[in-house]
Image (spheres, rainbow, N blue to C red):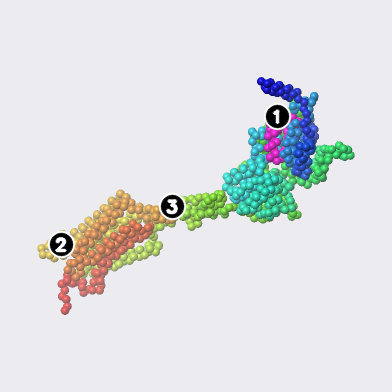
Amino acid sequence: MLIVLPTLLLFHHLYVNAEYSICRMMGDPSYPLLSKDGDINIGAIFAIHSKLTLPSFEFTEKPQFLSCTSVNLQDFRGAQTMIFAIDEINKSDMLLPNVSIGYKIYDSCGSRLSSMSAIMALMNGQEFAAGDRCNGQYFINAIIGEPQSSASVILSRTTGSFKIPLISPSATCECLSNRQDFPSFFRTIASDYHQSRALAYMVKHFGWTWVGAVNSDNDYGNYGMAVFLNTAQEEGICVEYSEKFQRTETEKIKKVVEKIKQSTAKVLVAFMTSFEMYSLLEELNIQNITGLQIIGVEAWMTSSSMIAPNSFRVLGGSLGFAVRKINIDGFADYVIKAFWDTGFPCEQRYRNTSQYELNCSRFQDLLMMRNYNKDVPEQRYSSNIYKAVYAVAYALHSLLKCTEQEGCEKGPNIQPQQVVETLKNVNFTVKFGDHVWFDSTGSTVAQYEVVNWQQDSDGSIQFKAVGYYDASLPPDQRFILKTENIIWTGGQLKRPRSVCSESCPPGTRKATQKGRPVCCYDCIACADGEISNETDSNNCQQCPGEYWSNTENTECVLKAVEFLSFTEVMGIVLVFFSLFGVGITVLVAILFYSKKDTPIVKANNSELSFLLLFSLSLCFLCSLTFIGRPTEWSCMLRHTAFGITFVLCISCVLGKTIVVLMAFKATLPGSNVMKWFGPAQQRLSVFAFTLIQVLICVLWLTISPPFPYKNMKYYKEKIILECSLGSAIGFWAVLGYIGLLAALCFILAFLARTLPDNFNEAKFITFSMLIFCAVWITFIPSYVSSPGKFTVAVEIFAILASSFGLLFCICAPKCYIILFKPEQNTKQHLMGKTQTKS
């Protein structure tokens, strides 16, 4: 209880003092470098100097002011652009009539410490209400700057809590697009999200799939590189290495350069600020690394700080994006005269007084720029600062309800949060034609020039525009490049190549190398029957059923159709022997006909002999139906013709064999068997045997006839055009019936081989049937195992071989006697009744 009571009294005392507090300045105030009072004030922070000398922080005496040196010409021109735009607005009768805009421009010297000091000074001001009480009013309504993304992140977190709008002309980090973290941040430049993706599109456009990447180790570089790497992966670009560093990390920079030196990638994407890029450039020069095609970003591509005596050795031919270069009418003249007469705080009337020393001593290095304006046409960010000032002016114009006739309302006090809400809806066009509005992230539309580092005839470095990227255009028109105007690294006119593996030509596919990125691969030839008709194909495509790949595996062509044709050597040979067999058969028939009255022709029924010769002719001819392209009719004809003609032939041979046996039986006493097997019965038996085969064939053709068939299973690269059997049972029934008759004929002939005639025809029939059966028994396994057209050739060979066997074994002995032994062509000799000479 004793502790709680004093504590409550202490809090009550603090509350009373806070309610009636008196504003006191703690420490020395921070003064703007350039300032002018107005009805409404705009703050600004620029790194007008680039080097900062820190005072001693030993805490033994009061710290001195920070000392800034080395003029940063780009930001100095930015400050001049801001003052120029404010002067234009103050003179305008259309925009903010009868309201003047003032400005307070602070120099950050490129230091976060100075930036924070400046932002605090802008937010608090130095004015007090009556009675030295805090008036509770904001000193400024908007702040323009910082140019750097990292500084903008820090300042936006500070100003965001108070809803003070911060408008940057060049902070491009995608991280600043987060409206939840940075609700009052705006910028008159696009987010790096667009630039990062455009970088990947550029690399893809030039066919570079193997690149290195280096970025600044800060918000700007890390966020930008992350978007680039994601987009590169989507576009099929491989990054060999990705390194980052800060300009103060000397050892890290050396390691990064060593990595670049050892890599095989010929393209380097540098997503860095000008400070880090300059440090990298120095180390690349020290290690004498040249020949890299460097791709850059707007932060350093056109920075004058990059131009040094040896920089072109490394950066010559570099490609990258830059903010569009726009000429602001009247600005070049303004920086020579009007700025120094009105906007510069060092006035001539103080030249001989101590006041001059106070006001002007810290501007001596700036005074050296008084008569210099050659850099003005190269300023690329000036237009963004110009647009930022006008955006604030249009927002104020709307809040003050300004009209051309009545002017603006000066009564209401404008709060910064009102300016924030109004900036979200501004929409205007500046005098050089650009349309200005902010999207939902507080950024403007992405518009870049593609610039190329080239060297003029006098040795000066030129940033030549070779294309553009405009996100406001349709997708197919956003990115335009004039490749013919580009000078590549080393002054080459030929575009460098940067790939891990060379492109796979058509007819091959890519096979990723194990453990390496997808851009590193081997080219594998497509397998037979597969094709790839484009470069760098990931897979080979299988050809459709009736197609096969050509020798290069680049296109599918119709498979070669294979069948036994009349024009090939095998077909010609088979046709020759077929016709030769017909010819011999015809000659034998003619010979028999001419000697038809002789005993040897009349023996065993000459009618059967002629019918046999006729059937043999048909057997030879039926082999021709197996040659040529199979058709529906030829498939049905070849097997039925073969079956019927051979049955007819075997029936005749069987008839002749029975005649021999019956003739022998007829010579026995009391035998009258020949009356049961006379000529009529012989004809009837031949007809009956043949009719059975005809019925089998008709049944086969009716149920499941043979038909043309494209066999694509045996050979993958060609089609075998053959006759499918339709019903295999029908085929083997036809063949089996022939075999049955042949076996029966062989048995009967074998039994009659020893009959006591000088010319025993049964003996020759036995030999013919032996050959016939041997041929067809051999045919079966050969037929089953032979591929393609050889199956048909085997069948034709079996037909011809068996036909020649029958012809020669049965007819050749008779022809020999007729032609060479006519004296034996007598009945007595045939019957074995002739007297033998002593």
Helix, strand or loop for disc 2: helix
- The answer to whether residue 535 shows anywhere in this view is no
Front residue of 428/29: it is 29
What's the residue at 14%, 64% (across, down)? 666
N-terminal label among 3 and 1: 1
Label count reads: 3
Q: CA distance from mark 1 to mark 2?
A: 136 Å
Helix, strand or loop for disc 1: helix
Quarter of the image that includes the C terminus: bottom left
- Range drawn in magenta: 138-165
Helix, strand or loop for disc 3: loop
Front residue of 551/293: it is 293
Write down the residue under mark 2.
674
Q: How busy is the neighbourhood of tag 2: few (under 14 within 10 Å), some, or many (20 plus)? A: some
Q: Nearer the viewer, mark 3 or mark 1?
A: 1
Q: Is 820 displayed left or right of 20 in the figure? A: left
